[in-house]
Amino acid sequence: MLEEWNVTVPALTGDEERRAWVYVPDSAWADRERRYPVLYMFDGQNLFRDEDATYGKSWGLLDYLTEHNVPLIVAAVECNRHAEDEPCGGRLSEYSPFDISFGDWGDIKGRGELTMDFLINDFKPRIDEQWPTKPDRKHSFIAGSSMGGLMTIYALMAYNDTFSRGAALSPSLVVNPEGVKAMIKNAKIAQTMLYMDMGQRELKRRTAKKVYAEVTAQLIGKGVLLESRIVPKGFHSEASWERQIPFFMDTLFYNMEE
């Protein structure tokens, strides 16, 4: 079952509403005592259905979860796409943990901390209250792509007491490589598992390849249980990320006991 409703993020967009979604397995209705791990995701509009997706193509996540009977609750909020005075409608700002310089758009103030504050202190408690979740760190996952992938790494590093596992698909590491490295270096983490990938076609630029290799090595050095993958012929799009769902799901559920 997929449910949709509207939420507000006052610290970011005041009273302006944006959509939120939660997927709950059908098995939850057959066994009312059962509880499920929760995967929190960024860019909720691009995950479940093509008709909601920014560019008309979603990850097809609803079909995958249903067809494979995945014992997982997935909760997500739409990114901000409506700020006319900000690049990408404000998405870059909300999905960056630090200030970035973005070409012709100039300097962008990172407001990722405010996004995470909403996710952890407002959205997650609401999901835990209304749905049959396992709310503890062990069963709380986080995932995203592009800037959402960057936010996933940020969440695991800075909010490690909340999230134990994650998936960062095509993370936007090159927007501020030194900021990413400092973030990882300064993190204090418990056992953490991360799936991270990059498409083969995304690594044609030497800088992108170098940064991905450096971040991969740093995460391993930090003790992160990392599944790092270069996707053959992979590129920066929902169609490519959809094909990676089985891979990151394997990581999220690896050695996961009830």
Image: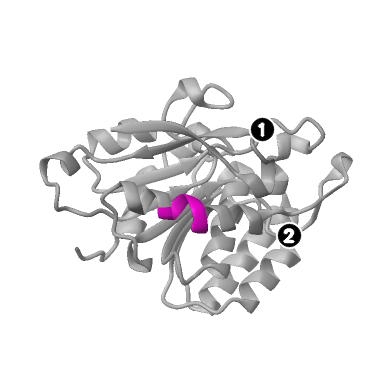
Indicate whether 256 appears above or below 199.
below
Q: Where is residue 151 in the image (x, y as percent from the top left)?
A: 59, 55
Q: Position of residue 47 (x, y in %)?
A: 46, 35
Horizontal arrangement in the rendering, residue 241 relative to residue 138 (left or right): right
Indicate whether 119 appears above or below 189.
above
Foreground residue among 56 and 239: 56
Q: How many residues crowd around disc 1 within 10 Å: few (fewer than 14), some, or many (20 or more)?
A: some
Q: Is the magenta stretch mostly helix, strand or loop?
A: helix
Indicate whether 167 appears above or below 239.
below
Residue 98's tag is 2
Task: State how the image is colored.
Answer: one colour
Quadrant assignment, res 64: top left
Horizontal arrangement in the rendering, residue 115 relative to residue 58 (left or right): right
Residue at 56% in and 33% down: 18
Q: In which quarter of the image is the C terminus?
A: bottom left
Residue 2 within the segment the image draws in magenta: no
Chain-order first, disc 1 or disc 2: 1
Q: Distance between the residues labelled 1 and 2?
A: 19 Å
Foreground residue among 11 and 57: 11
Residue 81's tag is 1
Residue 124 within the segment the image draws in magenta: yes
Q: In which quarter of the image is the N terminus?
A: top left
Quadrant assignment, res 4: top left
Task: Find numbered disc 2 in the image and state the secondary structure of the residue it sits on.
Answer: loop
Magenta segment range? Answer: 120-125
